[in-house]
Image (tube, helix red, strand yellow):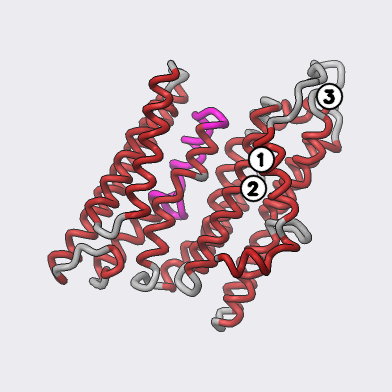
Amino acid sequence: MNPQAKLIFALSLTLGTTLTISSNHWIMAWTGLEINTLAILPLISKSHHPRAIEAATKYFLVQAAASALVLFSSMTNAWHTGQWDITQLSHPTSCLILTVALAMKLGLVPFHFWFPEVLQGSSLIVGLLLSTLMKFPPITLLYLTSPSLKPSVLMTMAILSAALGGWMGLNQTQTRKILAFSSISHLGWMAIIVAYSPKLALLNFYLYTLMTAAVFLSLNSIKALKLSTLMTTWTKAPSLNAILLLTLLSLAGLPPLTGFLPKWLIIQELTKQEVALAATIIALLSLLGLFFYLRLAYCATITLPPHTTNHMKQWYNNKPTNTMVAVLTTMSLMLLPISPIILTVV
């Protein structure tokens, strides 16, 4: 793909995201979502591999259906209330349809089936965009409409997402699929808290984006797409592999790393709101995720391949680590001590 085309798609993604997050009219938000979908499709399918074409087709169909539901929900609300303002969503049917539409956009259970498949058919960099930037507009809409949505529906979806995200990630051998199920699990944590404390859901999203970007870029620099490849990369970039271990544990939410902060705050807020049972269930379900993060970390740093003769060792890479990877990784590990500052800003 030539640089001009890449520039156009990057600008379109920026325009679509900005349009959705800054609009207060449903039609403008919908337009931004559509621009985003159309801009990412060529990036998914650029390799012309059948898996990539299949991923782009699945992504297009799901996002088109979700956008149609967003439009239908807003039109139903406007029909009954005369309001096109995003924050004025009050009709019960519209609220329910919008919950379904945003769940499809984000990949929340039970509308999650497309996400691992699409991520598996994309490159690591496009996978990073799909897991972070493309989730930002729907999360913003969820944030703006959170007072109107039913907490019980969101809580059910959230617990199911945390359960399935953890459970289905256990048996995977492809790093992109593991990160897709990790994303579904993290979205469960955001969905459970958005009705009680929308700002906390946004903080969780920002920190999730930070840690996921660090993991995706680290995997991209060592070119690891499968666990078997990850086992042989310790010779290529030993220091990066060692830090990847800590970044994965941060994504799992272990103290004293950055990933512990949102989980701690969400459990605290849920307990304050007297839904301690939901807090207990989702905290226990995060142990499933911890298992496959530990498996990834184990493959990346601790194991040697079982049959050393069958695996080609990769050459030691003497190139300096990308600055972006270094900054994101440092932030993924070190933000817990400055959590009071983060909370005052948010």
Comparing 126 with 99, the one in front is 126
CA gap, disc 1 and disc 2: 6 Å
- Asked if residue 148 lies left or right of residue 295, the reply is left
Q: Is residue 343 above or below residue 107?
A: below
Q: Which quadrant of the figure contains the C terminus?
A: bottom right
Residue at 54 percent across and 81 percent down: it is: 273
Q: Is residue 273 above or below residue 235?
A: below
- Asked if residue 66 lies left or right of residue 247, the reply is left
Q: Is residue 101 above or below residue 96?
A: above
Residue at 75 percent across and 58 percent down: it is: 254
Residue placed under numbered mark 1 in the picture: 215
Residue at 50 percent across and 29 percent down: it is: 122
Mark 2 is surrounded, within 10 Å at the Cα level, by few (under 14), some (14 to 19) or many (20 or more) other residues, namely: many
Mark 1 is surrounded, within 10 Å at the Cα level, by few (under 14), some (14 to 19) or many (20 or more) other residues, namely: many
| Front disc: 2 or 3 | 2
Q: Looking at the picture, how far across and down is residue 337, in whole percent?
A: 75, 63
Q: Are marks 1 and 2 in contact (CB under 8 Å)?
A: yes
Question: Could you say which quadrant of the image residue 303 lies in?
Answer: top right
Helix or strand or loop: what does disc 3 sit on? helix
Helix or strand or loop: what does disc 2 sit on? helix
Which amino acid, by three-letter code, is at mark 1? Answer: Val
* 121 in the magenta segment: yes
Residue placed under numbered mark 3 in the picture: 235
Earlier-in-chain disc, 2 versus 3: 2
* 13 in the magenta segment: no
Magenta highlight range: 105-125
Residue placed under numbered mark 2 in the picture: 211
Q: Looking at the picture, how far across and down is residue 199, in whole percent?
A: 50, 67
Residue 287 visible somewhere in the drawing: no
